[in-house]
Amino acid sequence: ESGNAATLRRMFPHKPKGTDMTHHTSRRPLALAAALLLASTVAAASPGGPGGPKGGPGMGGPGAPGAMVEQVIEGLRDKLALDSAQRAMFDSAHAQTIAARDRMHASRTDIRSKVQAELAKPEPDLAAVSAILETAEEQGRSLRHQARDQWLKVYASLRADQKAIVRDELKARMARMDSMQERMKERRAERHS
């Protein structure tokens, strides 16, 4: 089962009476297009991107592009031996990350109801659905960037030895990701041989 199907089931858990699309062949392509658009954009606009909000420390899960730096810094709090000024910056960045994630969670309910209202129409306006989802994606990106900028300030405040710890962890994560990607390529190659 694809992630998109699971996302759609979570967003649209039941079919209200009269929305069985199996008997409306002319609406099936429209519904499919709307569902694919919704699933792909909501996944990108959701907290942490496709990885989801619980994918790891910070706002990005494993699939959130650009979130690795925040995750690494947040995960290394104890190893970094932060001084009081650094700890205050760290706590501020962490609080902003949580607040941004919570705001994105709250907006998801609003987005869902707007999209559902549009898709409930006999001929939904997919341009309106797209605009709703793009606006949500832009807002989510803005919130993620604000939180990221706070984490970059934390990094800028670190001493050289602390930055080396962050660098080494980033290198280790990159190596693990490269290794995982290589294993996935090998498995795909085995399946297609």
Image (cartoon, rainbow, N blue to C red):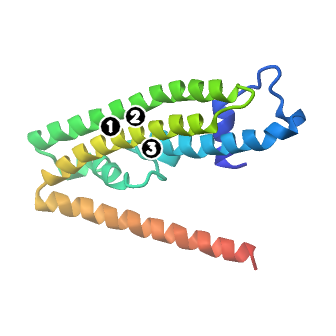
Between the C-alphas of marks 3 and 1, the distance is: 10 Å
Q: Residue 56 or 151: which is nearer the viewer?
A: 151
Q: Indicate the position of residue 14 as horizontal and vertical percent values.
A: 74, 25
Q: Is residue 70 left or right of residue 193?
A: left
Is 189 rendered above or below residue 163?
Answer: below
Residue type at numbered disc 3: Gly
Residue appearing at x 60%, y 73% in the figure? 185
Q: Quadrant of residue 96?
A: top left
Considering only order in the chain, which callout, 3 or 2, is on the residue closer to the N terminus?
3
Residue type at numbered disc 1: Thr
Q: Do the residues labelled 1 and 2 touch (CB within 8 Å)?
A: yes
Q: In which quarter of the image is residue 166?
A: bottom left
Label 1 residue SS: helix
Q: Is residue 137 left or right of residue 79?
A: right
Q: Is residue 53 visible?
A: no
Label 2 residue SS: helix
Query: Circle 3 sits on which residue?
Result: 48
Category of crowding for the residue at label 2, using alpha-carbon neighbours closer than 10 angstroms: few (below 14), some (14–19), many (at least 20): many
Q: Indicate the position of residue 36 as horizontal and vertical percent values.
A: 66, 45
Q: Indicate the position of residue 127 as horizontal and vertical percent values.
A: 59, 39
Query: Circle 1 sits on which residue?
Result: 97
Considering only order in the chain, which callout, 1 or 3, is on the residue closer to the N terminus?
3
Label 3 residue SS: loop
Category of crowding for the residue at label 3, using alpha-carbon neighbours closer than 10 angstroms: few (below 14), some (14–19), many (at least 20): many
Q: Are marks 2 and 3 in contact (CB under 8 Å)?
A: yes
Residue lying furthest right: 23
Total numbered labels: 3
Q: Is residue 68 left or right of residue 176?
A: left
Q: Residue 101 carries which label?
A: 2
